[in-house]
Amino acid sequence: MFLLAVSHWLARTHLGIFMRDSSYAFPAVEIVHLLSLALFGGSILLVDLRFLNLGFKTQSASRVARELLPITLGGVIAMSISGLLMYAGGPMRYYHNPAFQLKMVLFVIALVGHFTLQIAVALRTFEGVKEGFVKAGAVASLVLWFSIGFAGRVIGYV
């Protein structure tokens, strides 16, 4: 009920009205969202490929995870802000959309899982953890992120 009340409130704010009524605001924010997604998704892909020993083999997994962490964080922050702005343009439409609901549930799961793994590897707190666990986490991360992308594409068709 809380999210429903927030969605109703957001629809009536100046921001919600502006995003809904402007001819250019939504497309401009969507461009930022997609660029942020490319930055975020690219860094996740690189980290997960390293965890799977499919890339950056000359670099340690902890170094790749550590050096890409600021890019991953920056991308997710920009993507979240732009996503919230897009949501503000039609909160009730998104709130009741099953594809959007699935995307958000998967997003939270993937975000927690990926950052837990990436930060643990970056800080080398994974010492003693079997390599198979890191690889399984990378595979799960990739499956979740691709599922989120699929759900995001389906939003407009549901």
Image: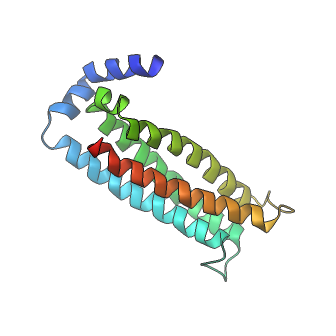
Quarter assignment of residue 15: top left
- Coloration of the structure image: rainbow
Q: Position of residue 32 (x, y in %)?
A: 31, 52
Query: Where, quadrant-wise, is the C terminus in this rendering?
Result: top left
**Residue nearest the viewer, comparing 36 with 96:** 96
**Residue nearest the viewer, comparing 87 with 106:** 106
Image point (69%, 70%), residue name = 61
Image point (47%, 17%), residue name = 2
**Residue 119 visible in the snapshot:** yes
Image point (22%, 42%), residue name = 26
Query: Which residue, as the protein is rendered here, is positioned at the far right?
Result: 128
Q: Position of residue 39 (x, y in %)?
A: 43, 61
Query: Which residue, as the protein is rendered here, is positioned at the far bottom?
Result: 58
Total marks in image: 0
**Residue 70 visible in the snapshot:** no
Q: Is residue 117 above or below residue 90?
A: below
Image point (14%, 32%), residue name = 21
Q: Position of residue 8 (x, y in %)?
A: 32, 18
Quarter assignment of residue 62: bottom right
- For this view, does 104 lie left or right of residue 25? right
- For this view, does 130 lie left or right of residue 142? right
Q: Position of residue 117 (x, y in %)?
A: 68, 55
